Amino acid sequence: MPKKIAPRELIQQDFHNLKTLERLCTIPRVEELVFMQSIEGRAHNGAGAFNKRFYVNTTIDDIVSALGKSPKTVKNKRQELINEIVEFVDSAIADDPRDRLITKSGKPLLGIHQFKERTVNYHDVLKGLYLGGLRDDPEIRKKAQEIYNIKIGYGKCYLVNTRIMEEMSLDGEILAHQENEDSINYFKSCGLIVEDPRPKHSVLKHMKWIYIRHHVGPGQSDDAAMVVSGLLYNVDVALGVFLSDAIDTLEKYVPIYRDQDKELSLHIKENYPFLDMDEEDVYELAYLAAIPENRVDEIPDSSLRYLLAIDQETGQSTLETHLNFIEGKPFLPIAISYKRIMISDLYDFVRDKLKSINKEIVFKIPEAFIKELDSSVTKVMRRNFLTVGPHDSLKSALKKVEARKAELIIVKDEFGNILGVVNPRDFLIFLRGRT
């Protein structure tokens, strides 16, 4: 067995655990693709079934093989999800836009149910895709450091010859976390980084798509990037940033490796004359999403899995909660990302970051939640919820509230998506007045 690669049985156990314990706000086919990639990070960090054993050279290839899946099929399925986003963009550029985040055949992008119902402005979605696709670029981050006098870590994925990597006494952990900016040209010259578009078969079997860090420092929060873009512009720009982050995740295991989120950004810039944005806007977003050095453990940065994961207590995903917050709709306090940080901490961070560049944003607070601001987090999390469907009678729901001593009515659609929250105290007085 190759050194520092997770055993097949642990990969299978961790995959089974994820499928059993978690639910994402997407279709099962996409859910599986996301879980496969999550296992890579869990193996590196010794999480879940890996139980503090660190398998730092484990790649998605190893995971797919351990699960008995076809690498070609999995890669094609992931690329198809990216292609559907690109096709949405191309239709808009060709003056045949869609007002929902759906494919030409009407399927929701990324299999996310609510995208089929949510109306969007394609112009703003393209803006978000442009911003999101460039903010992770190493040169953009490097320039943002200089402009805003901060420290941001950055790097990118390369095709790596793992045989040479082992000969050089390197591994995925060293390449991903140590400063390598001055060594990139050397890595290319000695064949560690494979630049040949048609490598020999003897090299091909050792090639893996591995992240190499250029500069050490705190990263950016994908949550912050999404929320701050929504507050600076609007919710559809935030959705574009989210889609770009999804491409960045999916492109790490596809038939042909390339920087597809950046490519799409440049494609939009070149072919969509109404964009009205430039790199200055990208530098600003990179700064606003950057996590300060002294707050690395305090600011959440959710992967695609954590953005889509449905909170068991509230039935709401992080993605949905961010959208509700941006739009001033009701949302419930949940702990997000693998760090399990309260979502309100992220929103406070975003507010402070915006103030630092003299951008004052009026945060919309749902009327039903204004009274909750003085409550403790523990009290709010312990509230008793009643869940109803959108067509249930309010009168019958209120009677259940009284019987169960519930404090909030959560309205969900058939897919489990939260449509809104009703404060029963606003209506019980009328019910009691009629009995």
Image (cartoon, rainbow, N blue to C red):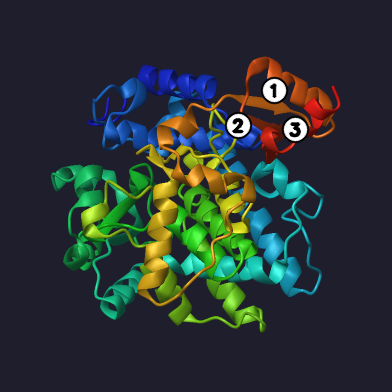
Instruction: Kindly identify the amino acid type of the residue bearing the numbered disc 2.
Output: Gly
Residue under label 3: 429
Q: Position of residue 252 (x, y in %)?
A: 45, 49
* Position above or below: 230 against 145: above
Instruction: Kindly identify the amino acid type of the residue bearing the numbered disc 3.
Output: Ile
* Position above or below: 395 against 58: above
Q: Position of residue 140 (x, y in %)?
A: 37, 73
Q: CA distance from mark 3 to mark 2?
A: 28 Å
Of badges 2 and 1, the one in the foreground is 1
- Residue 304 visible at all: no
Query: Which residue appears at 72% of the width and 55% of the height?
Result: 101
How packed mark 3 is, by other alpha carbons closer than 10 Å (few <14, some 14-19, many 20 or more), is few
The answer to the question of whether label 2 and label 1 lie on touching residues, with beta carbons closer than 8 A, is no
Q: CA distance from mark 1 to mark 3?
A: 13 Å
Instruction: Kindly identify the amino acid type of the residue bearing the numbered disc 1.
Output: Val
Of badges 1 and 3, the one in the foreground is 3
Residue under label 2: 315
Going from N to C along the chain, the mark reached first, 2 or 1, is: 2
* Position above or below: 107 against 314: below
SS category of the residue bearing label 1: helix
Going from N to C along the chain, the mark reached first, 3 or 2, is: 2
Query: Which residue appears at 45% of the width and 31% of the height?
Result: 379
Residue under label 1: 401
Q: Position of residue 337 (x, y in %)?
A: 41, 41
